[in-house]
Amino acid sequence: MTKSGSASAASKPSSGRSSRASAAKKEYLSLLAELDRRRRTNQLAAYRPYLRQGEFHAAGATNRERLFMAGNQLGKTRAGGAEWAMHLTGRYPRWWQGKVFDTAVRFWAAGVTGEGTRDNPQRILLGPPQQPAAWGTGMIPADAIVSTMAGRAPGALDSVVVRWGGGGDVQADESVLSFKSYEKGREKWQGETLHGVWFDEEPPLDIYSEGLTRTNATGGITIVTFTPLLGMSDVVLLFLSAQEMEGMGKASG
């Protein structure tokens, strides 16, 4: 009996250590899950541009119109989405040297078709179009998404209301982002006064001109991100200097 009692008493410290280890493991796993959640729902905080992306952003400090033209999968749309998220939220990182808006903004983001806009700019900004529960895992932080309005195509959005500012002495406000497509024609691009228009994929010249006009009253910006599939188009020519065009002419000659 004495031996049995001693064995039972000796087992208690071991059981206690096991319980504490289990609790510590659960807490550790919980912390890892929370860190992962914060990472997934605040992609903007982790964005660090590579050289060409950084040059594209910095050019916005002095240029209303910008073009990021590069090959596939080289971060053009990601750069556009990151910048749009900064302007929409007012959350500019310390390294930022580009355009800064000191008020909430009204922005558009557009692609060739409604589906193309959904699968590219919307996906980069909000997250997977097919998974509404995952909206907030794109460049716009989850805690900044106030509301969304559904579009016509499955998974597509018409617009998003985004919380702007609200940190320190900055009064909180709301920005509005609407999604557009070129296929609807120039008429659908008329009337609005905007702070910025993002063209993801090359637009027809009349659509680009109309989008730029929407920003005139605010002194706003336009950005164009695409892979050059249409050759030396009218829109591309808008961004080439006379010196660059002369150099290209000599090269082709």
Image: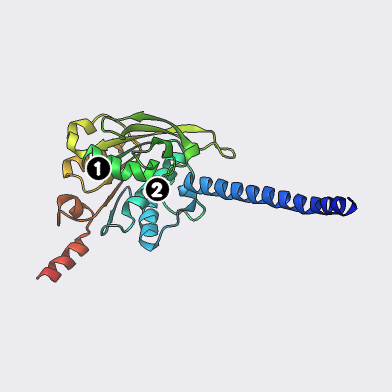
Nearer to the camera, 79 or 33: 33
Query: Residue at the location (49% across, 50% down)?
Result: 45
Query: Is 248 drawn above or below residue 45 in the view shown?
Result: below
Mark 2: which amino acid?
Glu
Q: Is residue 137 above or below residue 246?
A: above
Q: Position of residue 26 (x, y in %)?
A: 63, 48
Label tally: 2
Q: Nearer the viewer, residue 226 or 213?
A: 226
Q: CA distance from mark 2 to mark 1?
A: 19 Å
Please say whether residue 212 is visible from this viewpoint.
no
Q: Which mark is residue 194?
A: none
Question: How is colour applied across the structure in the image?
Answer: rainbow
Crowding near the residue tagged with mark 1, few <14, some 14–19, many ≥20 C-alpha atoms within 10 Å: some
SS at mark 2 in the image: helix
Q: Which mark is residue 116?
A: 1
User: Residue at point 83% right, 54% down?
Assistant: 7
Residue drawn where x is 87% and y is 54% of the image: 3
Q: Nearer the viewer, residue 27 or 11?
A: 11
Q: Amino acid at mark 1?
A: Gly
Q: Residues within 10 Å of mark 2 (few under 14, many from 20)?
A: many
Q: Residue furthest right?
A: 2
Along the polypeptide, which appears first: circle 2 or circle 1?
2
**1 lies left or right of 12:** right
Residue placed furthest toward the left = 253
* Res 152 seen here: yes
What residue is shown with label 2?
83
Label 1: element kind: helix
Relative to the observer, which residue lies in front, 192 or 114? 114
Left or right, residue 132 beside residue 40 = left
